[in-house]
Every structure is written in C-alpha cells, then in structure tokens.
Image (cartoon, grey):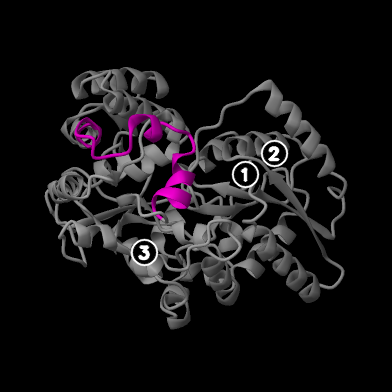
Amino acid sequence: MRPTAPVLLSATLLVAAAGLTACGSSSGDDPNTVRISFKQSTDNQIRVMDKYLASMKKQFEKENPGKKVKLVPITAPDSEYYTKLQQMLRSPKTAPDLVYEDTFLINSDITSGYLKPLDPYLAKWPDWNQFVDTAKNAAKAQDGKTYGVPDGTDTRGLWYDKGIFAKAGIKTPWRPKTWNDVLDTARVIKKKVPSVTPLNVYTGKPGGEQSAMQSFEMLLYGTGSGAAAPGTADPLYDSSTNKWITAGKPFKDALTFVRTVYAEKLGPDVSDALDPNIGTRIRGEFLPQGKLAINLDGSWLPQDWLTGSGHEWPEWSQKLGLAPMPTQNGQAPGKVSMSGGWTWSIPSKASNPDLAFRFIKTMQTKANAQKWYIANSGIAVRKDVAADPAYVKAQPGIKFFTDLVASTHYRPAYPAYPKVSTAIQEAMESVTTGDSSVEKAASTYDEQLKTATDGKVITK
C-alpha cells in the first residue's frame, strides 16, 4: 500500500469523525456481529478492498452460521482516515472489532492503548508460522508483543522506460551498481533525450511519507551504516540505546543525492516535485505518456494500470523495466529496499475480539491471502504463497518485487517516527529548492529531531 503522511488533527476532521462513528455503533453490543473498519478509497474506480472484504464476509457468514459481518468503511484521504479511526477507538461505544492499521502509525495506537496484543491468539494459530519474520516484526511493539497480522507488504525499486533508454543509447536490462550509476544514467538521458524528465525522486513535505520512505530512506538505508542485512545497523534509530541518530555522514550523503537531482535538473521541475499530487501524476501521466525515464517507486504501481482503474495501461509490462535500487557504493548486499504494509488489528475496546480474530483467520488462509495479494498488487508475506507458481506468474513484476523482501528494511515506526519523518521531509525540501545547503539542512534536522524525540538522540 502507499505510505501515508503524519496525522494532523483538526476540528473539522473531529466533527466528521463523530458523524462517522455514530453510524458505526449500532451493532456494538451484538455478540454475533463482528464490525470491521477499513480505509475505503476516495477513487470510486479503485475499490479493491471493498470487493475483497465483501467476498470474505460472504465466506465467513457461510462458514459460521448465525454470525454476521458489518463493514464500516471510512472514506477519506490517508491522514483523515487515521484521525477518524482514532476517534472511533477511544470509546467502547464506537470501537469496531477489527481495524486496518498502517505499520507507519500502528505504534502510536499501541502506545495510546487503543489496540489489543494478539499473542494469545497467534500462539494457537499454526498459520502464523508461515509469515516471514520481517513482516511479523513490523507489527511488534517495543514491549515485545504483536498487535497486528500483516496482510501483505510492499517493496521499492527503480522503474525505467525502455523506449527512452533506447533513444539514449543505454542498454537494457539496466542494472546500476551504485548511486553514481543512477545519476550518470540520468545525465546521459538529460543530454540525449531532453524532452523527458530523467529521474523522479519524491521530495518535500507535500509528498509526505512517500518523500521520506520512497526516496530518502531508500538512500539512507543503502549507505554504509544501513546496507547490511535487514534488521542490523539501522541508520535512523539505535536500538541498543533506544535513541534516534543525528544527521551524520550517511544522512548528509542521502541529502546530497537529492540535492544533486534537483540542482542538476535531473528531476521534475521543482514546482511539480512539490505538488501534493505528484504521485498520482507520476502513475497516471508521466510514466504512461513516456515523459519519465527513471522512477524510484513502489511495487504497487500496476494497480493503477489495471482495467477499470481509470488509468488503464495494459502495455506497461512491455514498456517498463525494473531494477533494484543499488547501495551507495555497491557494498553488500548490493541492493536495498524499504517495506511498509498494513495489518489487521483488534481494538482494546472491541466488543467481540474472539470473533474478530476468527475473521482474520478466514482472510489469512493461504488461498484468501493469495487472492488479496494479487488483487491489491501486494507482495506476499506468507512463505507458502511466495513459493506458489500461480502467485509468481499472476502479474508481471511480482517475482522481482517479492525477491526484494530478502533485502528490505522496515522503518523504526515508534511513536516519534511521524515527527521524525516530517523533519526528514523538511530537510529534503530545503535542499530541493536550494534554500539550504546540505550542512544547514542537516543541522536544522538535528534540532527538530531533539524536539520530536524529547532529546532522546545519539550521535554516531
């Protein structure tokens, strides 16, 4: 799923949340009804989740006579979804029995006491052994308990236009070994095919978490401090001291890459790069219309190009190539990815938690999980699905992005992370516009980091 921006509370949203929660509370005292809240797309043409949950509701009610499923969709942009969901979680009268949580912010809800640990259920569920460890850890809190069952993940890499590469005389398949290889390729394209944008790197606050995760962290986690095996040497957070790491050389190197892209005009025009809708434009305009040569982005893009999506592009798999994002200097393992994803969680104030977990088990059978991964252009977190030839062949690019799970990293999504992410976005924006040097942007980041984490920082 697409990453999200930090939650911003407002009076308007709170009013909207109150109205929504009232309509979802009628069956809260019915022990035979499980109420499920999820994010409903604001695009009427892309409602994959609605269709999937409708089929799961039908199956669950058939397999459990007398039990009912009530779907309580929240139709809202990402940030508003979290605001409304958190309002619902605060009261037993409005709390649903099952909620859809982004790993980006799940720890905030855990810290607030909104979610129930699932360990007693997971210990009795054999299928839990099929989930890969990295995905399990994404839903695990600092207290060591697990608060969500992941329904898939995502990975990130480089998408490139094979036609533009041919015009520029660049051989395909393309496999850059270092950051400089990526930049040098973009420079060749700028010179030989000047009518296109050579390289898209999301940046700045308007892009929200896609700027921090798709771009900056894909760079940072590929530096010397984070290019080892996933789970080691995290360049943002020091788990041995439980402190956030200030902007050292790896951080500044990542900022320098961003600065180079925009200073050399290798990326979109700054006004386009700072357009809040740049992600939608990249998927619906830049790539399908052959206006962009290289795009650092996520595994979910084909979902926007399916029939009925509004941006149908059946030729994409012939037009585009895929390459792993290299580590900074080609150091092992040679490629890097970031992963996010969503989980199904049970609120602490849920009326029917046992029934809710029974619904999770229905959704997360091998067959149903595989159905969801394919429909949502998601990446399998179940080992048995990842090994199934039917899954691997279901859609072009699935094997490429699934293979990246072995080289992927998850954000340190602790409660302070949303504020840390915002500070990263501001640092990126200041070097993108040229308002700050890399050194100044890093210094400002350090100041904001101390505030965001109550001074829990360390210099490495």
Q: Residue 319: x percent and y percent?
A: 35, 65
Chief SS of the magenta region: helix
Task: Work out whether mark 3 precedes mark 2 in sequence or the reverse, and give the earlier one.
Answer: 2
Q: Amino acid at mark 3?
A: Phe
Quarter of the image where the C terminus is located = top left
Q: Identify which residue is drawn at 19% across, 44% down.
A: 223
Q: Would you say residue 64 sits in the magenta stretch?
A: no
Near-viewer residue (282 or 98): 282
Badge 1: few (under 14), some or many (20 or more) residues near its Cα, within 10 Å?
A: many
Q: Residue reaching furthest bottom?
A: 389
Looking at the rendering, the stretch of residues picked out in magenta corresponds to 259-287
Residue at numbered disc 1: 115
Q: Amino acid at mark 1?
A: Leu
Q: Which of the two discs, 1 and 2, labels the residue nearer the N terminus?
A: 2
Going by the image, does 391 lie left or right of 163? Answer: right
**Does any portion of residue 96 appear in the rendered image?**
yes
Mark number, residue 401: 3
Q: For this rendering, which residue is in front, 431 or 283? A: 283
Disc 1 versus disc 2: distance between alpha carbons? 8 Å
Residue type beneath disc 2: Leu
Res 431 quadrant in image? top left
Position of residue 21 relative to residue 444, above or below, is below
Question: Does the rendering let one see residue 397?
Answer: no
Label 1 residue SS = loop
Query: Taking 68 as reference, is 204 above or below it?
Result: above
Task: Judge from the rendering whether residue 198 lies leftward or rightward of residue 103; answer left or right.
Answer: left
Q: What residue is shown with label 2?
A: 89
Q: Position of residue 211 (x, y in %)?
A: 38, 38
Q: Residue at x 72, y 54 (%)?
A: 353
State the residue in front, 58 or 432.
432
**Residue occupying image coordinates x 61% and y 25%:** 9
